[in-house]
Image (cartoon, grey):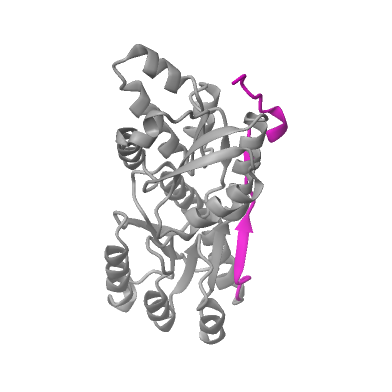
Amino acid sequence: MMKKLRFLVSLHTRENDFQVAQAQSAEDTARKLGSDLEIIYAGDDAVHQSTELLKVIQSRVEARPDAIVVEPVGRTALPQVAQAASTAGIGWAVLNRRPEYLAEMRRAATKPIFAVSSDHAEIGRIQGRQFAALLPKGGSVLYIEGPSDSPSARMRTSGMLETKPANIQVAMLKARWTEESAGRAVRSWLKLTTSQGASIDLVAAQDDSMAMGARKVFQEFSNEGDRSRWLNLMFTGCDGLPSTGQAWVREKWLTATIHIPALTGQAMETVAKAIQYGTQPPEHSMTASFSIPPIESLVPRNR
């Protein structure tokens, strides 16, 4: 009989729909596997995340988890923490990164070490195709990216630029994957003289919560004409979770989103199988995303 596994899952924040979905996926999978689970949040702070994980890895042996599933906050995928976990005989699954250190570490590891990612470049490409379908005559997009230190954000932007038509211009803003941070970015942009004469046709964000953060700013306009003009624009996001992004599409608050499957459950099941059979799983695997509604069902608005 397989022993009861203990998982530690480290996520960015509680203030983001996808991170909440990651936590829910972990809880559902722990119940399915009959495993113990602890979820910790880094508060969007890479140093705090690293410190908390090292504290767990260096705790007494009987208190340590069998595996750590981590979505790194910062630019790196925590190589020192990964090495410490591997040395301590703890499995290590990285979400949404493809660390260079994996290949070498796997050679000496006694527990599974691997990565699972969303295909962020393809998510960006889907978003660019959505723009093309919604703005067939071209136009301007106000585009809210994730933070500069996020490889996921950079890959999504790169993919979007690859597929968007040349007659669609994009004005970029940066936020931190939360509704509140997107609201701040949009308010700052609205104060710029360049925004006053800007003719925007579509507001897009790299996640649904940031798209809704932008909408809420426009809802606050005291001038009814301005408020109506902005809220009548098309809004798109990413994540497409049933209770948020998909619901917002049904409510017509978002024109479209992109469904991105949660990764934690897949990572935990991979760990359990690898430990049960004493194998190393593939070094890196990716999930598939898709447009909601499908690209061919998107209806452009008259400009």
From the viewer's perspective, tell me whether residue 67 is left or right of residue 114: left
Q: Locate the C terminus by quadrant.
A: top right
Instruction: Report the number of numbered marks.
Output: 0
Q: Is residue 70 visible?
A: yes
**Residue at image x 32%, y 42%?**
181
**Residue 225, percent from left and from top:** 38, 13
Horizontal and vertical percent position of residue 284: 60, 67
Q: Is residue 289 magenta?
A: yes
Q: Position of residue 246 (x, y in %)?
A: 54, 31
Residue sitting at the far top = 224
Q: Which residues are magenta?
A: 280-303
Snapshot quadrant of residue 169 = top right
Q: Is residue 65 above or below residue 217?
A: below
Q: Could you say which is closer to the camera, residue 219 or residue 4?
A: 219
Q: Is residue 114 left or right of residue 82?
A: right
Tell me if residue 119 can be seen.
no
Is residue 193 a member of the stretch shown in magenta? Answer: no
Q: State the residue at coordinates (61%, 76%).
A: 279
Question: In percent of the image, x 33 and y 57: which residue is there?
Answer: 40
Q: Quick one: quadrant of the N terminus?
A: bottom right
Q: Say whether residue 39 is left or right of residue 278.
A: left
Q: Name the quadrant containing residue 126.
A: top right
Compared with 226, 260 (above or below) is below
The furthest residue to the right: 296
- Residue 114 versus residue 160 in the image, above or below: below
Q: Position of residue 165 (x, y in %)?
A: 66, 41
Residue 180, by quadrant, is top left
Eyeballing the image, is 98 above or below 236? below
